[in-house]
Image (cartoon, grey):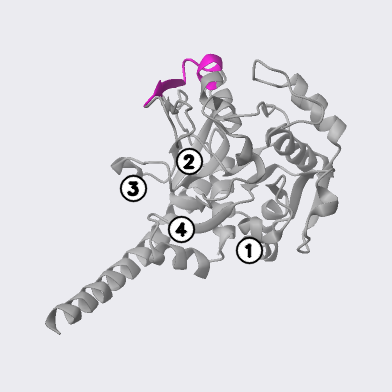
Amino acid sequence: MFVISAEQRARLLVAVVSGSRPALKQRPTAKYLDALRDAGFPTIWSVDERDAPSYERDGHEMSAYPHDWAYEYAREHWMQPVPPEPDGFLGAFPGREWAALEAERRGCWGWMNLDDNIHRLGFRRGSLSGCRLIDRHGGLAVHADLLSAVTLSTNAYTTGANLEAVNTSASDTRVTARAGFPYSCFVERVGPGREPWVGPFEDDIIHALQYGDRADGVTAALVPSLLYKKEAKSKTGFRAHYDSTRSVQLQRLMPQGAKIRVNATRANGQGNPRVFHKLTPIRNPLRVHDRPLFQAVENRVRQLTEEWFVAEKDAARVKILQRLAKVTK
């Protein structure tokens, strides 16, 4: 059961942006792509042409962007004090820009970004019940469908699922969608009005602020009930280049949207400061302009919630009986 039409699904390009992770086992997002393709969403891998020859294939198209183009784009949209090196680290944002441009070239209305290290999907809570519910209803196609429908029915230019690692408020359980910061699993419109990607660090936060602070009233949004979790242990890919200073430039560039603080003088025994950022709310609120389509999203979320609630109660009952059995032995 989909909220958006088959034509709209066929005109949303799903792109997994990846770098320096040649083996499929390093890219857990790959396990979700077949379900997306089966649901009618075209899927590609967006990688630098230097990485493409070493990448293990999985049957989904690989769109390799020229490295010279990536460097020139990065150089023109670089947000760090020290400029990039031609053969150095460029970050994920040129791959995201390439995917958005590829969607425009193909006549799509939008594209969906996926980081390559998503390893779990859920609904409302990161529980087994929520994960199984999403699996039963089509896996990542559920996220793609509902995120697309919110984007098409509101003033959001980009709409994301909720990263489990980010704390959410109790009020999130009562809303279908709200203004917020998409990170690694989101849909973005393409064409006139799309903001260019900048980087290399915190490019997702900056991108949301580019929309959420615009004078024309567009915004960035989240669907809190749709969850995803990223693999957190490896230090490969773009993560290998993260350090304690990446949030500093975010606060310099977007002082109205981000504040930073240093929690300790050392981090992980490396002697580096632990610099954290705190975001202020997106300024432009979410507004609905296609009420029937947004109502269809609300109805779908309500149906999933009712099924999830029953599954949660059944799972809790099983746990209680198991614990009682241990006590009575």
Q: CA distance from mark 3 to mark 4?
A: 14 Å
The magenta stretch spans which residues?
250-263
Q: Position of residue 178 (x, y in %)?
A: 43, 37
Residue 288 sits above or below residue 32 on the image: above
Which amino acid, mark 1?
Lys
Q: CA distance from mark 1 to mark 3?
A: 28 Å
The residue at which mark 1 appears reads as: 31
**Dot 4 crowding, Cα within 10 Å, few <14, some 14–19, many 20+:** many
Which amino acid, mark 3?
Thr
- Return the disc, 1 or 4, that comes first in the chain's sequence: 1
- Report the front residue among 34 and 238: 238
Marks 1, 4: nearer the viewer: 1
Marks 3, 4: nearer the viewer: 4
**Which numbered circle lies on residue 122?**
4
Q: Position of residue 154 (x, y in %)?
A: 53, 37
SS at mark 2 in the image = strand
- Return the disc, 3 or 2, that comes first in the chain's sequence: 3
SS at mark 4 in the image = strand
Q: Is residue 82 left or right of residue 257?
A: right
The residue at which mark 2 appears reads as: 222
Q: Residue at x 26, y 69 (%)?
A: 316
Task: Residue at the far left: name it.
Answer: 328
- Return the disc, 1 or 2, that comes first in the chain's sequence: 1
Label 3 close to label 2 by CB (< 8 Å): no
Residue 164 sits above or below residue 81 on the image: below
Q: CA distance from mark 1 to mark 2?
A: 24 Å
Residue 167 sits above or below residue 299 on the image: above
- Report the front residue among 174 and 69: 69
**Dot 1 crowding, Cα within 10 Å, few <14, some 14–19, many 20+:** some
**Which numbered circle lies on residue 173?**
3
